[in-house]
Image (spheres, rainbow, N blue to C red):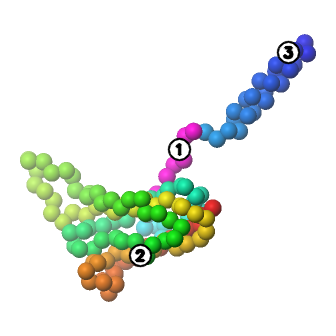
Amino acid sequence: MRLLRLLLLFVTLLLVACAATKSNTPEQTVILTKQDKDKVQNVAVGESFVITLDENPTTGYVWAVEGQPELLVLQSSDYVSDAPPHKPDRPMIVGAGGKRTFTFMAKKSGTTTLKLKHWRSWEGDASIVDTFSVPVVVR
């Protein structure tokens, strides 16, 4: 009887320990959009987050990171058109817009404000037509 109790206690402790360990499932990536402008974002060192904004580079206006945030690393900046892929039986859609996606990773603890600008780089800051900023707390 005593052996059964010890075995039951051992199994219970094992189950509790397994439940308390962190899953190997990757955390869901946070995706920010225009609606998240100026909302504080909390991330841990090593975590990534994404910002997706509307862009139409055929107008010359593109989103760009303003300055280099000390606590964050820009991992990628990609543009994807909203136009359907070109096929021989369908004409290309000239001037179609799309989405610019920035992926950042937090590299060290602290607080910063990430700033993006929508501009024509060859015309300088006078050409800025929109901005996006988000305070980021890295823990």
Q: Position of residue 103 (x, y in %)?
A: 43, 59
Looking at the rendered structure, the secondary structure element under dot 2 is loop
* Badge 1 amino acid: Pro
Q: Are marks 3 and 1 in contact (CB under 8 Å)?
A: no
User: What is the distance, in whole Å, between disc 3 and disc 1 at their CAs?
Assistant: 38 Å
Looking at the rendered structure, the secondary structure element under dot 3 is helix
* Badge 3 amino acid: Leu
Q: Position of residue 129 (x, y in %)?
A: 33, 80
Query: Which residue ends up furthest to the top in the rendered image?
Result: 1
Please tell me whether residue 80 belongs to the stretch shown in magenta. no
State which tag comes first along the sequence, 3 or 2.
Answer: 3
**Residue beneath the point at 61% across and 68% down:** 110
> What numbered label is drawn on residue 26?
1
Q: For mark 2, what is the residue?
A: 66
State which tag comes first along the sequence, 3 or 1.
Answer: 3
Q: For mark 3, what is the residue?
A: 4
Q: Magenta span covers which residues?
A: 24-32
Q: Residues within 10 Å of mark 2 (few under 14, many from 20)?
A: some
User: What is the distance, in whole Å, between disc 3 and disc 2 at their CAs?
Assistant: 66 Å
- Front tag of 3 and 2: 2
